[in-house]
Amino acid sequence: MRTTAERGIRAGTIAGALLAVLILVAGCASADTRPTDAGRATAVPAPRGPGGNGGLLVGARWYVQWITVGGRVTTAPPRAAAWVEFGRDGTAEGNYGCVPFRAAVTVAEAALTVGRKVDGGPSAEHCPTSYRVFGEKLRKLFSGPLGIDRRVDDLTMDLRNREGDYVAVKLIRPQGLFGSRWRLDHVVVGDSVAPVVGGEEVYYVFHRDGTVTGKAGCNDFTGRAVFDDDTLSMDRLTRTTHRTCSRELMDQERMLLTDEMVPRRMEYGHALTRAFEAIDESRGLDRFGYGWVAMPNGS
């Protein structure tokens, strides 16, 4: 068994090695200037909506943390099983914990109205009783007129009815997640944060069909990226171009891209309104993850 000192040395060695690679400033002399699908990706659009708290809700996915009815708190199922995503087309989709649903929703600056809902079949054949009990309470509470209050900040909201009962939600997927460019801002290694070189030439474009495209600083790439509850699984990240750049940039690219068949699974609940992280916490002191920032229009 490794001692605490040995574990600290190992984590520091890994972090130091990656930091040495990532903090070097590098340029790229491209030998292939043909346009690619990655190059045609769009930047994250400016938020559109009613403004206020309602504008923060629209276009993003929120998971349910708990509900309060008559002053009694019921905690939601784990792993973001209960969630709701507010579309820009006057609809919302989500899951009560076991049963998916769609609803007509009108969102204003400080309130929303949940109209007719259509429930689907159970998400799993055998759903725990606690999930079903919670789901039924959430189904009844998430209906009709609801006020929108910030609980702590713009990442946490309470959807409150006229009786004072409410649904507590927290941001899990930021606005414009799919089909837009997300610049890779940093890599998490152990307890260290390593900046990424290459600026806006290192970006990812996530697609709803479970794929990802982008640019790793020198070459374009494609791969798989599946968002499921609070987990992002990425694998088979491979180059689609064959440019040659500086050694430092190519070393960073090799670290970012992998053709492994086994997905790297990371929790991505570390979200901000225009940024998010995905981190594999299962590695303990050797944890690894990514931090992305929305690229503005025109990038």
Image: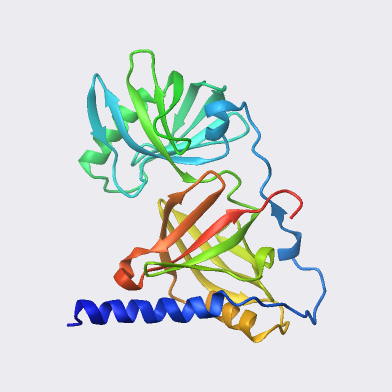
Residue 259 is situated, as x and y percent measured from the top left of the image, at 53, 79
Q: What residue is shown at x 31% (from left), y 71% (from top)?
A: 285
240 up-or-down from 166: above or below: below
Relative horizontal placement of residue 273, taking residue 162 as reference (left or right): right
Name the residue: 70% across, 52% down: 43
Q: Where's residue 235, x and y in %?
A: 50, 71
Q: In this view, does 174 lie to the left or right of 299?
A: left
Image-quadrant location for residue 241: bottom right
Count of residue discs: 0
Residue 144 figure quarter: top left
Eyeballing the image, is 78 above or below 132? below
Q: Is residue 259 visible?
A: no
Expressed as whole percent of the image width and height from the top left, the position of residue 292 reads: 55, 58
Q: In the image, what residue occupies the spot 58% across and 31% down?
A: 55
| 45 vs 122, nearest the viewer | 45
Q: Quadrant of residue 243?
A: bottom right
Q: Nearer the viewer, residue 297 or 130?
A: 297
Name the image colouring: rainbow
Q: Residue furthest left?
A: 1
| Residue closer to the observer: 269 or 134 | 269
Q: Which residue is at the far top?
A: 162
Quadrant of the rendering where the N terminus is positioned:
bottom left
Q: Which of 147 and 285 is in front in this view?
A: 285
Looking at the image, residue 170 lies above or below residue 35: above
On the question of residue 200 being in view, the answer is yes
**Location of the C terminus (image quadrant):** bottom right
Q: Position of residue 66 (x, y in %)?
A: 30, 34
